[in-house]
Structures are given as C-alpha cells and as structure tokens.
Image (cartoon, rainbow, N blue to C red):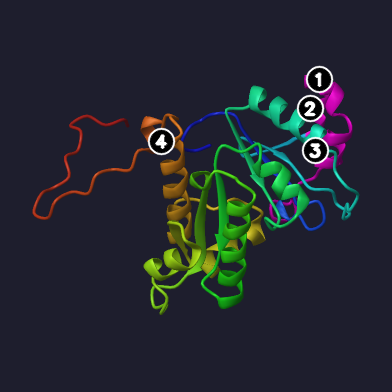
Amino acid sequence: QRLTGKRILLVDCDLTGGTIGFYLKLVHSYSLVDALQHVDRLEPSLWNSLAVNHGGVEILAAPAMPYADPLDPSRLKVLAEHARMAYDWVILDLPAIFTQTSLMAVAECDRAFVISTSELPSLHLTRKAMTLIDQLGFPKERFHVLVNRADRNEEMSTADMERLFACKVHARLPNDYFALHRVVTLGQPLGPDCELGRAIESVARGLCLSMGGEILPSSVPAKPVPAGMREARPVLSRA
C-alpha cells in the first residue's frame, strides 16, 4: 500500500489457525466465514462491516474460533470475483498448500508464493508442494518459492534449493527476529526501517512491476551517491 497507494485487500484464509487478526490486534466481529456465508448479497454496506481497515489495508480476518466445516468452492470463487472488482490488489494468506482451502484459492490466483525455510523438514515439504502443484496441472510459472528466515552463513545455497524444488527461488528473506518481535508486540506491520522490511518491500515492488502496476514516485528508492561526491541540496528550504 505504501508503494502503490491502491486499494488492497488482505484475506486470512487459514480458517483453523489464522493469526493476522492476532498479530495486528484487530477488533473485529466478522470473518472470512461470514463473507462466504453471505456471498450472494455482498452489498457495500455489508462488506464494510466484514472487512477491517488497518493502515490503509482492508483485512478480512480468519474466524476467532477454528472453523473445520467444508467450504463450497463456488462461494469462494464468487468471493474472489467480488474482491477483484472492488480492489486493485487482493492478497490471500493461505495455510499449507495441501489443504482444500489452499488448492481452491490458488486456482483463482494470478501469482502464488510457497513459503519455505532452510530447515530440512520445511525443504522436504516445499519439494512435496511443488511436486503436487505439477501433478495437479497448475501452470508452474504461476508459483514462486520464498525462503524465509534465511541466514547468510547457511550451507545450502540458492542453487542447491532450486535443484531440490525444480524451480527458481524468487527471494530469500533475512532472519530478523528482533524487528519482527517489535512490530508484533506493537501490532504494526513491518516498515522499511529494518532489513526484513526492506526485503519484503523489494519483493512487493518486483511483484507490482511484473504485474503491470505502478509505483508511487515517493516510494522509489533514492540512487546511491557515488563516493567523492556531495549530495546536492536545494538552495531554498521551508522555515
């Protein structure tokens, strides 16, 4: 939202263990389940009561209590179509790819990111996920792997991971525990004032440009000043 200034919807699709509402300390009475149950009459007045605005981003949270009933794929499809018409960007935070909810959701997505870490169990599950995606016939170019909590001193290189997954690693996000702990404690999203925040913003910037989106001029990173040159400053300044 900082990069584009566009209307953005973030949906927590983990119906049994969604945590976005908890992390951001949202006060909400309704959830994705309510939206799916009333998908046949999503007038603006009803939608405004379902979604919560946080920092300029509309959020459709997961239910407070775990919801394990099966979902109707047709209702999820209608909800996705409604969100596409109402927002410029729709982001779905999904549980593991092996769940029915995730498989139904990725069928509606233009781009999907599979999150892994460099730990052996996570690498194993990511390889299984990419194999499943291939077996189900999803276009493989739609899916990208993001490696979270990456350490510069890890023995497994990006090339090793790409051979393991049989696909490209889109990006590696650094392990920035203290910055993440701080914003979770405050109930705020990460900003560009920490290494992890800058890495996530870089991924968002690349995604936006690759999908034909526009970046606000104020969010374009400043070019580094070559060594030996002084930064030019305006002659006039405001008092």
Which numbered circle lies on residue 209?
4
Mark 3 Cα within 10 Å, few/some/many (few <14, many 20+)? some
How far apart marks 2 and 3 lie (CA) works out to: 20 Å
| Label 4 or label 2, whichever comes before in sequence order | 2
Numbered disc in front, either 4 or 3: 3
Mark 4 Cα within 10 Å, few/some/many (few <14, many 20+)? few
Residue assigned mark 3:
73
Q: Which residue: 43% across, 53% down?
A: 198
What is the number of callouts on the image? Answer: 4
Q: Quadrant of the C terminus?
A: top left
Do the residues bearing badges 3 and 1 touch, measured as CB atoms within 8 Å?
Answer: no
Q: Secondary structure at mark 1?
A: loop
Residue assigned mark 2:
47
How far apart marks 2 and 1 lie (CA) works out to: 6 Å
Report the amino acid beneath label 2: Trp
How far apart marks 4 and 3 lie (CA) works out to: 31 Å
Report the amino acid beneath label 4: Leu
Mark 2 Cα within 10 Å, few/some/many (few <14, many 20+)? some
How far apart marks 3 and 1 lie (CA) works out to: 21 Å
| Label 4 or label 3, whichever comes before in sequence order | 3
